[in-house]
Amino acid sequence: MSTAAEKIAAVRANIRARDPEQKEFLQAVDEVFESLTPVFEKDPKYLEAFERLVEPERQIVFRVPWIDDNGVQQVNRGFRVQMSSALGPYKGGLRFHPTVNLSVIKFLAFEQTLKNSLTTLMMGAGKGGMDFNPRGRSDREVMAVCQSFMTELYRHIGADVDVPAGDINVGAREIGYLFGQYKRIANNFTGVLTGKDLRWGGSLIRPEATGYGCVYFAQNYLKYKGESMKGKRCVISGSGNVAQYTAEKLLQLGAVPITFSDSNGYVLEPNGFTQEQINHVMELKNVKRVRISEYCAFSQTAQYFPGKKPWEVPADLAFPSATQNEIDQEDADTLVANGVKGVFEGANMPSTNEAIEVYKKANVMFGPAKAANAGGVAVSGLEMAQNSQRLQWTREEVDSHLERIMKDIFDNSLAAAQAYGLKDDIQAGANIAGFLKVADSMLHQGCV
């Protein structure tokens, strides 16, 4: 008879053998697997649940043909991975980026499963997108590709089936085009997407939610350590939605956000960004859609560092808010050497597993993405609730719910870590707390 350790090793080997080329997906699974080993050793039934969980309930891959402004046919590849419906309808964003492939979407859907579980809301998990680069494309071209994408996707989604949202390069404009095409084909006005405009079913605080939530999570961690946000210098990567509202909430809580970045480099405000300066970053990225280097024409104090990452700047806290694997082991070593005491992930899986090991050895506070950036999907869940009620809550109501949810996520992650003798390992605790809720639900519902 196999020992528990042999069974655990066999399941892990089977997962890797099934999809050996899917490096992003396997990276995400490995990170969670390590945390869950004490759970599997204590009760083997959870190992069987995990083996089922990592195989998506459904994987949809489809052609997205469209005509560009020159009358030339273009063809992209669309994806929707419906990972788990154990807790509710599939829920998760759509990413439009040239790096999108099945491995990336599966890793995002897997992470989404645990993240959605942590929110305490009744949401399953999915993720989707396509290998389309919107940079340099006209509004008409973006509309054409969104309409073509939805012409296939619509048959797989619904308010009680699968509710997509935005992600990288899918913002208010894209959600509008996608929703319009869904409504046209299905002849149905329903809450099938979140991140909608306020005038037709959206929620207040939704654009801010991921960034605000990440800062609320960090605030709870600092409070647990007997510290506060006041005066903390914070390096932020990215300059999109998450980074912008992370900076705004940090400023509101008395911290000092000092960087934004994009794939070309980063900009530094040595004395910290003011609200007026953050508003200008929002205009540059959300309206003009230009590079962050353009910010220097607005500010006499800003410094731009082409081809560099913001992790080289001395700071107290770091908020990686750009994309996966943006912090590797070398970057993590640099952060620690520069005095960073906490890393809170606004992006999905921005730290490699090697980087996370550096944080742990240096006793750096670590807020993993599935916990720290759950604010976005939490408010998406609140948007779904408002749509079902045919009501729109006030800004104060939504923000209050968000702040409470992020506190609950921190508290539940800490409690799960301590229950398994892992002290205040929030990464492990988040994985355990998120997994157990999904796994118990799967076991209750049978082998499906």
Image (cartoon, rainbow, N blue to C red):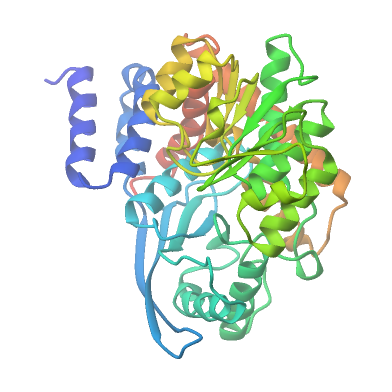
Q: Quadrant of the N terminus?
A: top left
Report the number of numbered marks.
0
Question: Is 230 on the left-hand or right-hand side of 436?
Answer: right
Judge by depth and name the residue closer to the eye, 194 or 39: 194
Q: Residue at x 71, y 38 (%)?
A: 302
Q: Residue 343, position in %: x, y? A: 57, 24
Question: Is 193 on the left-hand or right-hand side of 81?
Answer: right
Above or below for 215 versus 166: above
- Residue 425: tell me if it is visible: no
Q: Residue 57, position in %: x, y? A: 36, 54
- Residue 351: tell me if it is visible: yes
Question: Is 104 on the left-hand or right-hand side of 20?
Answer: right
Above or below for 352 versus 158: above
Q: Quick one: which residue is furthest to the bottom in this view?
A: 71
Residue 344 lies in what quarter of the image? Answer: top right
Judge by depth and name the residue closer to the eye, 358 or 23: 358
Q: Residue at x 48, y 17 (%)?
A: 359
